[in-house]
Amino acid sequence: MERRRVVVKVGDEVPQVGTLAFGIVDRGTNVIEVRPTSLCPLSCIYCSVNAGPRSRNRWAEFTVEPGTLLGALEDVVRFKGVNDVEVHIDGMGEPGVYPHLTELIKGAKSIRGVSVVSMQTRLYMLTEDKLRELANVGLDRINLSIDTLNPERARYLSGTSWYDVKRVMELARTALDLGINVIASPVWLPGINDEDVRELITWARNAGLGMGKLPPVLIQKYIPHKRGRKVKVRVMPWGEFWRELRRWEVELGVRLTMSNEEMNIHKAPELPRPFKVNEEVKVHIISRGLIRGEFLGVVKPLRNDVVYDRVITVVAKPELEELLINSTVRVRVIENDHNIYIGELIIK
Ligand code: SF4
């Protein structure tokens, strides 16, 4: 049994809707999530998607051809029929390592109906020149994942000895100088980085993050995920979390919350869900899925229409790999929330 992870290059033959691992995720708003790669060189100790070299449960990674992603994005934007779409580049990896980032941002920004292109990143892998390039093709905002300004704790939290948070702070300032807005989005791990988050808020405010239009920092609550890496900390109830944020807002005189309305996030037509839960579908298995024991399949027959074609994650015993890949099987859909399809193999 092959233990190493494989990297699957995704092209035009693969639908771009149906998985969280790559492609397009539509949650029924004017924000469309675009996921070019699941690769990440860091191994954050709390990573909810279990990415990076230290992942123990991934057995495949995905990277999408830019033309494939942009073609699908254009169709989804057209389907939405609104003129204020925000394309948010994120994913189950680090979009900053995607080699076609400039092409992706340039293409996304030129689609009629797209008003904002933003990106979630840790920023450390970019250079001043690259940021200039991204600013020139229209990147509007960076949501900066940064959990502390303390270099040692930053290395600990990122699970990576070479991660340099001071360099990240320099790059954030450069992005602002180039006209790209930056907001920090630290994960708050109670008992580990409480003081760091407070320090981060002060730095972000003084450095001009948010550009006076958005809060400089939007703090993320730590939530352990079933398949993510977990940290032994107290999981704060939501009520307490919001109370603490309001307390910090008053104490530091900084806005730390914002409503969807203020962020211009609103409902917009959601892609139809072509397959129902419990429905049996015919699936051509093309590769492993992201997590060991998952396979990636294309639901057949294809209509060659982004709005209706789907990929599906099929759960099956890893030992069946040789038998399953490149074969066509029957699958029962067990989940289809927001068009993320999970199915189980039907063995007759
Ligand atoms: S939290 Fe983000 S940067 Fe850290 S390992 Fe996960 S995907 Fe990579």
Image (cartoon, rainbow, N blue to C red):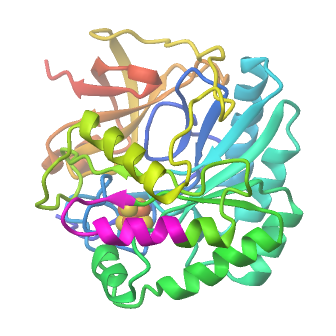
Q: Is residue 238 above or below residue 206?
A: above
Question: Left of 222 or right of it: where is 129?
Answer: right
Name which quarter of the figure residue 240 lies in.
top left
Quadrant placement of the N terminus: bottom left
User: Where residue 11 appears, x then y in whole percent?
Assistant: 62, 48
Decide if residue 59 is in sight here.
no
| Ligand 1 lies in quarter | bottom left
Q: Position of residue 280 (x, y in %)?
A: 31, 12
Q: Nearer the viewer, residue 10 or 148?
A: 148
Q: Is residue 133 above or below residue 114?
A: below
Up the image or down, 60 lies above or below 79; here it is below
Q: Residue at x 52, y 19 (%)?
A: 301
Residue at position x 54%, y 55% in the image: 253
Residue 165 horizontal/vertical position (percent) = 48, 83
Front-most of 275 and 300?
275
Question: In the image, 119: left or right of 230?
Answer: right
Boundaries of the magenta span: 187-202
State the residue in front, 206 or 310.
206
Q: Is 88 placed above or below 280 here? A: below
